């Protein structure tokens, strides 16, 4: 398979980011938003088409959890797809001309690198704190959204450890700062995880409904219906707390409470046969079906948000 149908170690992803920025400086710009405990840079790629004047924007992050390799693979594939088809596919052009897209391909590079070199099943980042031999904070429990209540662990040895305080982690802080600075243009937040084929929206930290629950639910219905129609793939959708489990401190809930009205977490393929070890042959179909869902969501948000 091509570059986009394989998984890549961290250093190859950094050189891909470099090549891509140099190849299409007309459509993509790289923004350094921070760096990690192990000093890996956090790069956001901004995709922007022609259209002048103020534009809506969307944010997408991949690789919050280290072992979910399909997630960074999707972000990379998604960027490539938009750059390759901007001139060829009117719907790609229409998206990029009406909406700026910020993509963070690997939010947890320290953890990702650890899954390549030491432990394939690692989930958290690799930050060390005094007073414990255990390592790592779950970045999706570290946001300031009902932080460290039921569904997260205060024990640094657990895989859902919330960290010492909200936004304690450099990765969380960098993303939260960027979203705070750009909250007036960002109308759509998307976080890419795996696995289980779900499309989740707020809330996950409470059983209460989000204020625009009906709209979030309707757009999720549209997106999953298109996935089934065009790719015969079933995705379950609903608010996180009711659809999987109560889990506080997540990026989606935090972004939503910041004021970003459409906020979604995707759990990509599969439903457990391969789980985190999704074979490379399934990268392309996994990416194509999620692209369909995201195109459905972005066109709704461009027209209605
Ligand atoms: O538990 C998580 O962080 C996500 N599932 S995963 O298996 N990829 O770890 C679900 C996140 C849903 N959203 C929130 N909990 N806020
Ligand atoms: Zn995850």
Image (cartoon, rainbow, N blue to C red):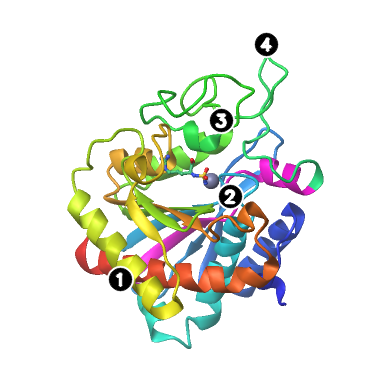
Image location (x, y in percent) of residue 210: 23, 43
Query: With 50 as the anchor, is 282 left or right in this view?
Result: right
Task: Look at 56% across and 34% down and name the residue there.
Answer: 138
Task: Between residue 164 and residue 16, name the one nearer to us.
Answer: 164
**Which residue carries the number 1 mark?**
299
- Give the Cα distance between marks 4 and 3: 17 Å
Q: Quadrant of the C terminus?
A: bottom left
Label 4 secondary element: loop
Whether label 4 touches label 3, CB < 8 Å: no
Whether label 4 touches label 1, CB < 8 Å: no
- Give the Cα distance between marks 2 and 1: 25 Å
- Give the Cα distance between marks 4 and 1: 49 Å
Task: Between residue 245 and residue 2, name the one nearer to us.
Answer: 245
Query: With 182 as the anchor, is 36 left or right in this view?
Result: right
Is residue 249 visible in the rendered image? The answer is yes
Neighbour tally class for label 1: few under 14, some 14-19, many 20 plus, Cα within 10 Å: some
Neighbour tally class for label 3: few under 14, some 14-19, many 20 plus, Cα within 10 Å: many
**Which residue carries the number 2 mark?**
63
Earlier-in-chain disc, 2 versus 1: 2
Earlier-in-chain disc, 4 versus 1: 4
Judged by depth in the image, the label closer to the viewer, 4 or 3, is 4
Whether label 3 touches label 1, CB < 8 Å: no
Judged by depth in the image, the label closer to the viewer, 3 or 2, is 2
Label ID, residue 131: 4
Earlier-in-chain disc, 4 versus 3: 4
Image location (x, y in percent) of residue 218: 23, 61
Task: Look at 37% across and 31% down and name the residue there.
Answer: 145
**Which residue carries the number 3 mark?**
169
Residue span colored magenta: 97-116
Task: Look at 35% across and 56% down and name the residue there.
Answer: 237
């Amino acid at each position: 398979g091509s570059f986009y149908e394989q998984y890549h170690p961290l250093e190859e992803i950094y050189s891909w980011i470099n090549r891509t920025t140099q190849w299409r400086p007309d459509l993509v710009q790289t923004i350094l938003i921070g760096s990690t405990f192990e000093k890996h840079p956090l790069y956001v790629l901004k995709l922007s088409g022609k259209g002048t004047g103020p534009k809506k924007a969307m944010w997408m992050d991949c690789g919050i959890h280290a072992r979910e390799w399909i997630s960074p693979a999707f972000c990379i594939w998604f960027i490539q797809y938009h750059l390759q088809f901007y001139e060829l596919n009117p719907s790609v052009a229409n998206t990029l001309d009406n909406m700026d897209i910020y993509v963070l391909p690997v939010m947890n590079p320290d953890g990702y690198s650890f899954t390549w070199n030491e432990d394939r099943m690692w989930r958290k980042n690799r930050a060390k704190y005094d007073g414990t031999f255990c390592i790592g904070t779950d970045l999706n429990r570290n946001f300031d959204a009902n932080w460290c209540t039921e569904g997260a662990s205060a024990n640094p040895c657990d895989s859902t450890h919330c960290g010492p305080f909200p936004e304690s982690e450099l990765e969380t802080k960098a993303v939260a700062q960027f979203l705070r600075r750009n909250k007036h243009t960002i109308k759509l937040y998307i976080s890419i995880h795996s696995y289980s084929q779900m499309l989740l929206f707020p809330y996950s930290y409470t059983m209460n409904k989000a204020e625009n629950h009906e709209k979030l639910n309707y757009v999720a219905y549209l997106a999953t219906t298109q996935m089934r129609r065009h790719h015969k793939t079933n995705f379950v959708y609903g608010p996180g707390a009711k659809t999987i489990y109560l889990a506080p401190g997540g990026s989606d809930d935090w972004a939503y409470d910041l004021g970003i009205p459409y906020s979604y977490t995707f759990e990509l393929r599969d439903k457990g046969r391969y789980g985190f070890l999704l074979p490379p042959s399934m990268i392309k179909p996994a990416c194509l079906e999620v692209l369909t869902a995201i195109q459905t969501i972005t066109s709704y948000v461009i027209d209605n948000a």
